Amino acid sequence: MNIQKTAAEETLGFMLPTRRVESFHYTDLRANLKSLGEQAARPEDDATRTMGDSFPRLASDACVLHFYDGHGFERNETLPEGVMVSRDLPDALSADGGADDTIPQINSKITTAGVSIAVAKGKEVTQTIGLAHAHTGAAESIASTRFSITAAEGSTSRFIERQMGRSDANHMTSSAVSLNVQQGAKVEYFIVQQAGVGATHLARLNVTLAQDADLSIFVLNAGGKLVRQEVKIAVNGENANLAIRGVNLVGDNAHIDVTTVLEHNVPHTNAEELFRNVVAGDGHGVFQGQIKVAQPAQKTDAQMACNTLLLTDEGDFSAKPELEIFADDVICAHGATVTDIDDEHMFYMQARGIDQKTARGLLIKAFVDEVVEELEAGEELEEAFTGIIDDWLDANI
Amino acid sequence: MLEIKNLHVRIAEEETEIIKGLDLSVAAGEVAAIMGPNGSGKSTLSYVLAGKEDYEVTEGDILFNGESILEMEPDERAASGVFLAFQYPMEIPGVPTMNFLKAAMNAQRKARDEEEYTTPEFIKTVKAAAGELNIDFNMLKRALNVGFSGGEKKRAEILQMQLLEPKLCVLDETDSGLDIDALKIVSDGVNRLRDPERAFLVITHYQRLLEHIVPDSVHVLYQGRIIESGDKSLALHLEENGYADVIARAA
């Protein structure tokens, strides 16, 4: 087969997946990413001081590592005790999955800034560690980062990776993260994506979980034009516990794809996935949830749910759960629903004097806020997350 | 206060007419009971008053304080003082009852150009009202009506009615699903709200409720029309004899 390479493919040196690649069936990367653009220049230090102004901090006590337009900046925030940071660019994520690993491959070609973070053995870090990437989003620019995190044995830590931008010009951002949760370590990893509406944001989070590890992931997508967040998790230690929760707010003209792959490789592990999605205008949402249970992984308990509220006839949402189970003594369940706002609920609220817009807002908010509540991340963070959701709903509903 | 004139209603998108020329007047301060056999149009009447869009008024008018409410949205009707206590109150997951009450009370106050409640005022007001209705305040922190028992839901309806201070209260089979104690609590709640400035339309199957909420007038609804009106003795007559002779008289 002889296909004319796109400009993006010329730059990257490999072909991008079309709908014919199963894992990209709902997100045709080749058609949507014709050219890559240029690396954004390192912004002036002064300019970066105001870039995050419209994105107030989510956790008041956080220690934040700053990235602007794909470049690292030292702000000398005091690191919590037991946390070590190296400013060297971490190794690229492995890409042995071929086309399925297109996003790590793209990231490996375009990233120049990143950090490696190590949480020391047994340390209970109470301060949130922020990984903040603000984008100017100049037309046809690229801004990308790569992080590597190791949470050593018995440690406790919390991270917020945040993408922030206001640009409606066509630009690209990317993130690749490897997170290694060692034996008995407890990690919360929250991804807050608030890229500008012109952004193509391609991201991958790779995770390994050791024995007795406990991981809570939260993905909040509240921005971007074409977004694909991949989460790939290898559950390699017995009694590991995993929760992946997410809220996808899909605006008019946006395409937001969350693709998760869970590999249960050992017995006695638990995983719970819950996504709630709101689609406005002619937005397109995608959730692909793959659960693979290897033959030795007996007593796996994996639950997956994906619920969507479609607010218009123009929007759509594709949900694809995929179970690949080779063990015979497991509990795996998945469910996907797509609904509109319940007219009876609306009437009841209006009959109490609440106008249509407010009633709709309350019902949509209730639908997604339930996910935030489940995080049990503390009042400040939960309010920060629901605040982002409220702002998005005000602007998009 | 409420004047229904030659009202004809059908289910939107269907030909079936449910209310077929209904006339009814309820004065300020009056408690009017509507009784009628199953399928006579009682619940339809309550929904049409509240403005549910599944129903289409094809003829006639509903005047509330002299003005037609037919073109008003349900929330506008509520803000102007119409309240429907639902036969089956909706469960709304994820919306804490307190948030809902605050949204409703402040929306109505705002629509009437009144000051919104401050949070302490609001909590104090709700606590006092909940106490009178034997409602555990902690229950109000839970999602609206979710996991409430039948009796709790009905009490929560009366709580809303008390807090929203409507002018016209429509009670749609508020007695259904209530045990005797709950019936007493709910009826006492309604009786406390009786006021010369407030009218009640009490829709029920049974005379039993009317022993507690004593009506000024009783109207029999049959096949979408009021076929007989009287005082509270009419309810007793129905209890003893059923609807047959009243229907026969109207035929």
Image (spheres, coloured by chain):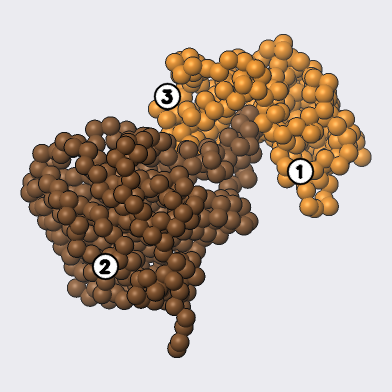
Numbered badge on residue B55: 1
To which quarter of the image does residue A271 belong? bottom left
Give the side of residue B212 with respect to residue B23, left or right. Answer: left
* Residue B143 in picture, x, y percent from top left: 46, 36
Give the side of residue B8 with respect to residue A211, left or right. Answer: right
- Residue in the foreground of this view, choosing between B15 and B135: B15
To which quarter of the image does residue B203 belong? top right
- Label 1 or label 3, whichever lies nearer to me, is 1
Q: Chain of mark 1?
A: B
Hue used for the chain lettered B: orange
Which residue in the protein does label 3 denote?
B137
Asked whether the residues under marks 1 and 3 belong to the same chain, the reply is yes
> Considering only vertical position in the picture, is A228 above or below A360?
below
Residue type indicated by callout 3: Phe
Q: Is residue A184 visible?
A: no
Numbered badge on residue A303: none
- Quadrant position of the C terminus of chain A in the picture: top right
**Chain corresponding to brown in the figure:** A
The residue lying at 72 percent from left, 26 percent from top is B201
Which residue in the protein does label 2 denote?
A263
* Residue A334 in picture, x, y percent from top left: 40, 63
- Residue in the foreground of this view, choosing between B193 and A135: A135
